[in-house]
């Protein structure tokens, strides 16, 4: 805004001549590359303010954005790009009105710009992430009431007595309480006036509404040393990246919560990112015990009302701890003091749709912009992070031992070539007897197989036909419990056929290979009477389901857990001593860049659930590749030796983290169209020293949701800025209406 403020002093309703209006950039939360220009007579409109603007025939809510020059100036040189051409001022439309709500803080606008420039995602789509939870009006809060602490209640009428019987420590709204007690709301009001009920915090999640006495742990000497360093780092309030590494069960969580405590002492806001927050009930209850209040939880399945409250609270700058999925990075923190990324090696931090970004990397960026420390936590850090440690960019703090003298589990590979399972079975005799012995000792066992459903493939014995998804290059997976065949890549499902769809033979369809449902069946057959709990995304559909599962396991109402990768998360099951990995080789197939690294991380994490308390744990890995470096690393538990080898494998070819990658995923309505676009891209590929374009090649999922896919990979030396190269490259193309190119910077998945 460049004009003098007095120019806008018109009487309300008076139209301003165009020269008296100010130009203002407004970013809308939709697929727009950058902000749109409008005019406004209001000199007080500043970047960050929310406004309603006309767009076509509609009105949209957007955010006043910084001028293009400002945006460019705050981007690093290698991410900046030419600003859009200025629009003829006479064609600009005026802003409809300013919305009276707190604006988007500058640090968040800066982050939006950066994420957009880094990922090449339209700026408006990134803003949309920052506006999830935003609301024009402060959210309506329904007050909740609970039983007041017992005093000497006056003599009560029958109706009031009913209210006290119905009320409990659990807060309820007046309406709900009246319904439960079967009285009118007026009776509840009377009870409130008599102090029989007290107001409860609507959201027992805010720091000043402590609900219990905090119970911090007594740290061991080695934990305390690390905790002290972390507290010092937090107190400095400068940007610093730390890798907190420690074996499974060493108390990393307890230790980083000390850093969170320090941040609260500074009365600032902390953000903890967890990969599977929706199910992290154990983490949340532990936090609540430790601090005496619950954290603000943020993830995609939270309701709108909850989101709005969190958004507003964070925006208010009041001290708090947010625990969330990667999208919590886009909350409007105004007093951020610390970011923690737990399980930093997890591929789940990568968002693969919409704005494609890596939560861990963007967390480091966010911390840098906010000049606060960021702590990356893992038992099995990613090679990216280890390389940063080696280069001296990240500080490395290590917890070497399990807490309270617990030993790391004994890990053994079961060579399936030497002692295979019986025909048609998947559990070797050794694993089965280990399960029997464990259960006989009154301990719990866990079987891990990263595959949902009954069988990954259904085959016709007569004609060899394989049942495939009509829309994807993928087999349909039988889910026997639901009596359906399901595609794991799209929403397609169909009933389990009774005859072969190709040759019409009956009783010819056979399942091939195991999924966890099939393993469950085998366990039921082999270990009669065992109480099984299945943990997969089919069974653990909500936080409540996870909470129930955790309780059942803790109370030993379950003997054996069968699960997919969900069981690898930070669970702590005191009675669990045996972990059996049904197919340790599964993740090594497909041969993507990080297959071995990921296998070691995942299996070490799963194995790390065994023997976390007094009784020692055992991990048995069923493998046909006992000599594979990944298996050897798991057995020897020498993670760092393995990672050194990984680094040596990747360095010469400039594979990440020793070079950079960007994937271009081309898709189109027909194979010909996809090929044509892929070829055109390939013909115009950038050339030069230190860069190479691999492909085009059919993507492993050649067809996905009916679209035909091809992949190209740009690989460069470290110092080369890939974004400008990609921008130039993509600008040269005109896409047909069925064609699409998705850019994935630093790809994690290669499907
Ligand atoms: N100082 C301590 N006092 C009491 N309990 C502790 C202490 N340190 C750790 N524990 C307990 O030991 C268990 C393991 O600790 P924690 O979960 O923090 O380890 P971790 O390193 O984060 O584990 P993982 O990486 O396997 O998830 C937890 O139940 C935790 O409460
Ligand atoms: Zn499909």
Image (cartoon, grey):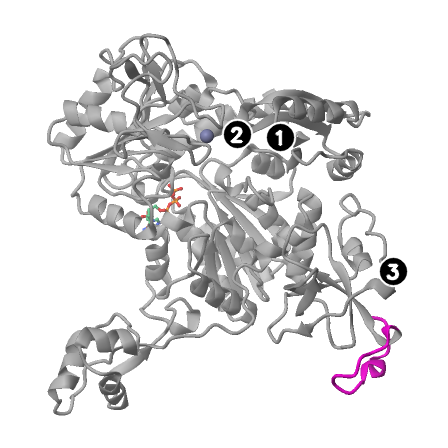
Magenta span contains residue 12: yes
The residue under the point 60% across, 39% down is 389
Q: Measured from the top left, where is residue 188 in percent x and y?
A: 24, 84
The one nearer the camera, 492 or 596, is 492
Would residue 110 appear left or right of 627 to someone viewing this image?
Answer: right
Reading the chain from its start, which is encountered first: label 3 or label 1? 3
Q: Kindly identify which residue carries mark 3.
A: 88
Q: Quadrant of residue 12?
A: bottom right
Q: Quadrant of residue 176?
A: bottom left
Q: Secondary structure at mark 3?
A: loop
Q: Kindly identify which residue carries mark 1.
A: 667
The one nearer the camera, 71 or 322, is 71
Residue 501 is at least partly visible in this image: yes
* Marks 3 and 1 close (CB-CB < 8 Å): no
Would residue 419 appear left or right of 570 to someone viewing this image?
Answer: left
Q: Kindly identify which residue carries mark 2.
A: 704
Q: Secondary structure at mark 2?
A: strand
């Amino acid at each position: 805004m460049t004009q003098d403020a007095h120019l806008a002093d018109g009487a309300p309703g008076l139209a301003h001549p165009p020269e008296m209006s100010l130009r203002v950039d407004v970013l809308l939360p939709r697929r727009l590359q950058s902000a749109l220009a409008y005019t406004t007579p209001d000199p007080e409109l500043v970047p960050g303010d929310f406004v309603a603007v006309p767009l076509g025939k509609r009105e949209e809510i957007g955010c006043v954005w910084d001028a293009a020059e400002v945006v460019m100036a705050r981007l690093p040189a290698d991410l900046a790009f030419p600003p859009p051409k200025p629009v003829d001022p006479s064609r600009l439309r005026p802003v409809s009105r300013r919305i009276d709500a707190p604006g988007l803080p500058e640090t968040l606008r800066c982050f939006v710009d950066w994420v957009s420039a880094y990922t090449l995602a339209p700026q408006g789509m990134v803003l949309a992430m920052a506006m999830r939870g935003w609301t024009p009006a402060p959210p309506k809060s329904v007050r909740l009431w609970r039983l007041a602490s017992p005093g000497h209640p006056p003599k009560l009428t029958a109706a009031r007595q009913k209210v006290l019987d119905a009320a409990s420590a659990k807060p309820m709204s007046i309406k709900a309480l009246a319904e439960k007690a079967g009285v009118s709301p007026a009776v509840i009001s009377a009870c409130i006036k008599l102090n029989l009920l007290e107001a409860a915090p609507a959201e027992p999640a805010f720091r000043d509404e402590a609900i219990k006495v905090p119970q911090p742990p007594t740290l061991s000497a080695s934990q305390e040393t690390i905790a002290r360093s972390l507290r010092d780092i937090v107190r400095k309030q400068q940007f610093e990246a730390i890798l907190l590494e420690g074996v499974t069960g060493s108390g990393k969580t307890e230790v980083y919560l000390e850093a969170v405590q320090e941040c609260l002492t500074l009365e600032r806001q902390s953000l903890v990112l967890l990969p599977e927050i929706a199910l992290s009930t154990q983490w949340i209850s532990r936090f609540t015990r430790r601090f005496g209040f619950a954290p603000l939880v943020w993830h995609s399945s939270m309701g709108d009302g909850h989101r709005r409250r969190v958004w507003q609270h964070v925006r208010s700058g009041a001290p708090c701890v947010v625990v969330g999925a990667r999208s919590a990075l886009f909350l409007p923190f105004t007093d951020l003091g610390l970011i923690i990324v737990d399980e930093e090696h997890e591929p789940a931090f990568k968002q693969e749709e919409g704005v494609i970004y890596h939560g861990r990397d963007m967390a480091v960026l966010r911390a840098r912009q906010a000049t606060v420390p960021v702590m990356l936590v893992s038992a099995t850090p990613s090679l990216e992070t280890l390389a940063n440690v080696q280069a001296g960019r990240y500080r490395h703090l290590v917890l070497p031992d399990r807490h309270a003298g617990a030993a790391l589990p004994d890990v053994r590979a079961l060579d399936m070539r030497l002692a295979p399972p019986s025909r048609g079975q998947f559990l070797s005799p050794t694993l089965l007897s280990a399960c029997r012995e464990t259960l006989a000792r009154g301990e719990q066992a866990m079987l891990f197989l990263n595959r949902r459903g009954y069988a990954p493939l259904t085959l016709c014995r007569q004609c060899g036909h394989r049942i495939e998804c009509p829309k994807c290059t993928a087999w349909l997976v039988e889910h026997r419990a639901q009596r359906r065949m399901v595609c794991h890549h799209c929403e397609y499902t169909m009933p389990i056929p009774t005859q072969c769809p190709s040759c019409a033979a009956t009783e010819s369809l056979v399942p091939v290979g195991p999924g966890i449902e099939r393993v469950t069946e085998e366990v039921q057959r082999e270990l009669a009477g065992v109480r099984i709990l299945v943990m997969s995304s089919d069974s653990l559909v909500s936080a409540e389901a996870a909470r129930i599962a955790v309780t059942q396991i803790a109370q030993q109402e379950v003997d054996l857990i069968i699960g997919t990768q969900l069981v690898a998360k930070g669970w702590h099951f005191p009675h669990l001593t045996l972990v059996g990995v049904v197919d340790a080789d599964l993740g090594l197939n497909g041969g993507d860049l990080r297959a071995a690294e990921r296998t070691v991380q995942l299996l070490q994490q799963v194995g790390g659930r065994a023997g976390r308390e007094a009784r020692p744990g055992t991990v048995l890995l069923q493998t046909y590749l006992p000599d594979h470096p990944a298996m050897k690393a798991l057995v020897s538990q020498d993670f760092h030796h393995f990672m050194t080898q990984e680094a040596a494998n990747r360095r010469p070819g400039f594979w990440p983290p020793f070079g950079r990658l960007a994937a271009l995923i081309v898709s189109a309505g027909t194979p010909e169209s996809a090929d044509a676009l892929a070829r055109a891209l390939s013909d115009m590929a950038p050339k030069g020293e230190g860069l190479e374009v691999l492909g085009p090649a059919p993507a492993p999922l050649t067809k996905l949701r009916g679209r035909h896919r091809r992949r190209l990979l740009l690989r460069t030396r470290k110092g080369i800025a890939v974004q400008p190269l990609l921008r130039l490259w993509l600008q040269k193309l005109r896409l047909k209406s069925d064609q699409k190119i998705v850019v994935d910077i630093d790809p994690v998945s290669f499907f």
